[in-house]
Image (cartoon, rainbow, N blue to C red):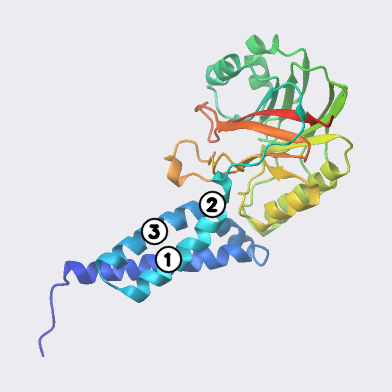
Amino acid sequence: MTIPTKISLRTAAAYLLYLLLALSSAATILGFAGRLWWMFDIVSHFRVQYGLVLIICVIVALLLRQKRITVLAMVFAAANLSLILPLYLPQPEHQLEQLEVIRTIVANVHTANHDYDSMSSLIKKERPDLVVLIEVNQRWMDALNDVEDLYPYIEAFPQENNFGIAVMSMIPLDEAVITKIGDSLFPSVIARMTIEGRQLTVIGTHPYPPVGPGFTNVRNQQLAAVAAFAAAQSGEVILMGDMNLSSWSPYFMGMIRRGNLHDSRKGFGVQPSWHARMPGFLRIPLDHILVSDGIQVHDRRLGLYIGSDHLPVIMDFSLSNAE
């Protein structure tokens, strides 16, 4: 009996194909079971990566003329693409009179980040009417003195534990408070303003990252409480922040439903914001802006690198006013 000592390139490619297909297909399925185990919820965040791997599997399987494997890879690729492609479909415009266009930025600046100039430059360049900052400490607030003159309305709660938060506004604020919503361990910022007779409530929040079952539960409780709070507001609502989960988490979908909100990302693509130092196809979308029915999103995009592990999110919107 002769034992082969070499594996052909075709055979090696087939083995690699089977391995990638098995792993990405399993991850695709487990990502739908995020409520069963906290690790499955984390698995749900990488739909773009699974889709790319499975498309490669389809191409390799076609080259190897493996029809069954090709079909199987196409099915699982389609399962991921069905969750990604709707984010790129144009959204209908409100058939209502629109008020002034407002620009907002939400940015997790990262407490340990000392690249203050990049954030200041971004604000000076974009001139947002409203800014929500995540993970600010006192050094950050002091360093932004050169742009604070642009914002007569500021409410900040700087901390050294990565959960400081602040809002800066050019628009007059009726109220701005830092508070813990529900049983949350960490503060959110709430800013209320009146724009041409319409009330707008802006909520900035930053729940704990899902680094274990206990902290994942803490995150989920905060997101549920914030969503319920958003649903209880009169007028229009914008909820924004580093929410430490992606659009494909079942908890994100639950937050959308509970808060009567919409993902501002729809029509503008995935826009993955974390980890900022990675290539775009390896990043995932953790930073979100959610809006209520009466808000028309005109543009949404990622800002330039500011030294943080997150990229800022910039959104142009207007309130729609019924005639």
Q: Position of residue 311 (x, y in %)?
A: 54, 33
237 is higher (above) or lower (below) than 83: above
Q: Pointer 3 and pointer 1: residues touching (CB < 8 Å)?
A: no
67 is higher (above) or lower (below) than 250: below
| First reached walking from the N terminus: tag 1 or tag 2 | 1
Amino acid tagged 2: Ile
Q: CA distance from mark 2 to mark 3?
A: 14 Å
Quarter of the view holding residue 279: top left
What residue sits right under mark 1 in the picture? Answer: 74
Q: Position of residue 152 (x, y in %)?
A: 77, 12
Q: Nearer the viewer, residue 99 or 310?
A: 99
Q: Which element carries disc 3, helix, strand or loop?
A: helix
Residue at 77%, 32% in the rendered image: 96
State which quarter of the image contains the N terminus: bottom left
Q: Position of residue 211 (x, y in %)?
A: 61, 52
Residue at the extreme bottom of the image, as rendered? 1
What residue sits right under mark 2 in the picture? Answer: 84
Q: Which mark is residue 55?
A: 3
